[in-house]
Image: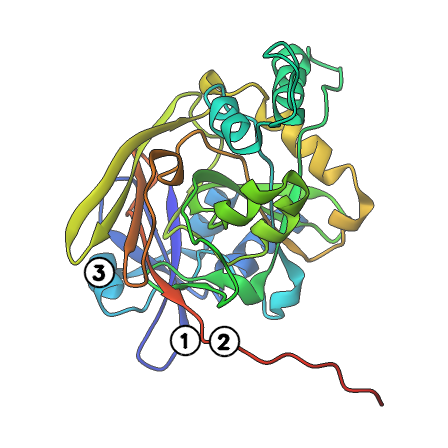
Amino acid sequence: MLISQIKDASGKIIVAAREDGSEARAVNNAESVYALAMEAANGGKSLADVIAAHGYGEAVDLEKAYSEGRFLPPITHLDPAHLHLTGTGLTHLGSAATRDSMHKKTSEASDDTLTDSMKMFKMGLENGKPKAGEKGVQPEWFYKGNGHVSAAPGAALVSPSFALDGGEEPEMAGIYVISDKGEPVRIGFAVSNEFSDHVTERINYLYLAHSKLRPASFGPEIRVGAPPSDIRGTSRILRDGKVIFEKPFVSGEDNMSHTFANLEYHHFKYGLFRVPGEVHVHMFGTATLSFADGIKTEAGDVFEIEAGGFGLPLRNPLKVAEEETITVRQI
C-alpha cells in the first residue's frame, strides 16, 4: 500500500491510499497520516487494517495534485518541532569510495593508512549485520533538523546563502511514530532527498555536521510495510528541462553493509528519540551523488528521484536563499 497527503482547495488534508499502479482514493474521516498511524500504534493494529476500517471515499488524481503543487510531505506533525529529520551514512556497499575520496588525508604516509571514513565503513562490513539477538556496530549518525525544514514534494529545497554547494542524496527513509507507551513503530519507507553541502563537508570531515543542516524532502508516497531487500532507483537532475545528470542507485539490505534493524536500533536506543507522539524520518544513506561526478548544481535545477514500487517520483527544484544579517541582541 502507498499512502500520501495532499491539500484540497480549502487547505484541508486529504489522505490518499492506493496499491502500486492503481487509482488512489481518499481515506474516510482521516485527519492526517499521523492520526491514522497513531491510531494503529496505540491500538496494536496494522495501518492497513486501520485504513480498511475507515473505508474509502472519492478517487484522488495524484498527478493533478502534484502539478498544482498540492502535495504535502507524506507525514506531518501539528507542531513541526516534533518531527525529526536524521540519517546515517557509510551504510551502502558502494558508498565508501565516494566518501573516502572527499575526505582523503593529504598527510597520509601510505595508501595502507585508512581514513576515518574507511574505518567506519570497514566496521559496518564486519559487524553491521549481526546475528539474531545480537547487537551490531553503531553507524555514523547525523541530524538534519525538524519539520520546519521538511520540504514538500514539488516544493523548493532552499540552500542557504552561505552554502558552498547544494547537492542531492537519493536515499530510502524510514518513517516512524512513537506510541503513547514510548514504542517506536515503523509505518514504512519512502524515497528521500537528503540534500547536503558536499563542498563544505569536503573542507574538513568535522564540518559534516554543518553540511547536513539543510532541508530534506521525502515521498510523495510512503510504501507501507517492510521494504524489499533489493531496491533499485534512478536519480537525475534537470536544467531548463534537459537532463544533465542521470544515474541508477541501489538500496535495500542486499546492497547494504548494515541491516535496517541494526540502524533502527542505534537510533532508537536513545530515550530522546522515544518521546510519545513524535515523528521520525530517518534516512539510510546512499552510494550515488552527482557531486562525485563533478556536477555543480545551480538555482532552478530540478532534482528527480524515483524507485520501483515506491510510487510517484520525488521532484524538488533548487533555490538559493538571499543573504541574511544575523545578530544577537542582549536583553
> Which of the two discs, 2 and 3, sits closer to the camera?
2
Residue 255's x, y, as percent?
Answer: 45, 19
Nearer to us in this view, 315 or 287:
287
Q: Quadrant of the N terminus?
A: top left
Name which residue type carries label 1: Lys
Give the labeled residue for mark 3: 61
Give the labeled residue for mark 1: 12
Sooner in the amino-acid sequence: mark 2 or mark 1: 1
Q: Residue at x 65, y 66 (%)?
A: 81
Name which residue type carries label 2: Glu
Sooner in the amino-acid sequence: mark 3 or mark 1: 1
Q: Residue at x 63, y 70 (%)?
A: 79
Residue most extreme to the right: 331
Q: Secondary structure at mark 2?
A: loop
Crowd around label 1: few <14 · some 14–19 · many ≥20 (10 Å): few
Q: CA distance from mark 2 to mark 3?
A: 39 Å
Q: Is 104 on the left or on the right of 307, as rendered? A: right
Give the labeled residue for mark 2: 323
Compared with 255, 53 (above or below) is below
**Res 124 → quadrant:** top right
**Res 241 → quadrant:** bottom left
Residue 39's x, y, as percent?
Answer: 60, 54
